[in-house]
Image: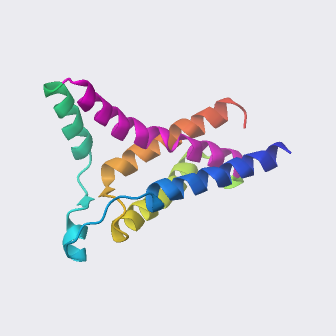
Amino acid sequence: MKRKLLWAGFAAYILLMLWLLFVRFRGVEVTDYWAQLSGRVNPVPFSSMGSMLRALYYNPYPAVLWTVVYNIGGNILMFVPLGFFLRTLLPKCRSFWRCMGMVAVIMTAVELGQLFTLRGFCEVDDLILNLLGAALGFRIAKKSGA
């Protein structure tokens, strides 16, 4: 029974994430598809996070703080359940590095999917933060004995 509930929770989590990452309205830009693609890629590690933290340092206002917390914290917290569910439900993900490898593959596919469907930005920083969140979820699952 517990396992069925976990699988149901995992399915609900996946559906919610698909909606958040691909379906939720993001606005429409009326420009060339390839021009939009080039503006939606950031392969430089820590550049977005660094920019946000610098903005917060120089503008310590609630709106800037909220933006930083929403972007950085959100990218971590949204993927804690992924690490938890993978560690708990998939025997091959009992190893930390194997689980993180699977998360890296999944998140790379998500980032590329967002890029090519113009539903978000493809950033290495997102991958780093998502892996951090999944690692926290893995740790929680391991500590709980799941």
Please tell me whether residue 101 belongs to the stretch shown in magenta.
Answer: no
Secondary structure of the magenta portion, mostly?
helix
Q: Position of residue 102 (x, y in %)?
A: 54, 56
Q: Position of residue 9 (x, y in %)?
A: 69, 47
Q: How is the image coloured?
A: rainbow
Q: Quadrant of the N terminus?
A: top right
5 sits left or right of 61 in the view = right
Looking at this rendering, what residue extends furthest in the left direction?
58
Task: Report if residue 93 is visible in the image.
Answer: no
Above or below residue 105? Residue 98 is above
Q: Which residues are magenta?
A: 60-89
Residue at the (51%, 49%) spot, across then down:
100
Q: Say which of 58 and 46 sits in front.
A: 58
Task: Report if residue 145 is visible in the image.
Answer: yes
Q: Position of residue 76 (x, y in %)?
A: 44, 39
Q: Say which of 142 and 10 sits in front.
A: 10
Number of residue marks: 0
Residue at the (39%, 60%) spot, across then down:
111
Residue at the (39%, 43%) spot, across then down:
129
Please tell me whether residue 73 belongs to the stretch shown in magenta.
Answer: yes
Above or below residue 142? Residue 123 is below
Residue at the (54%, 40%) spot, across then down:
80
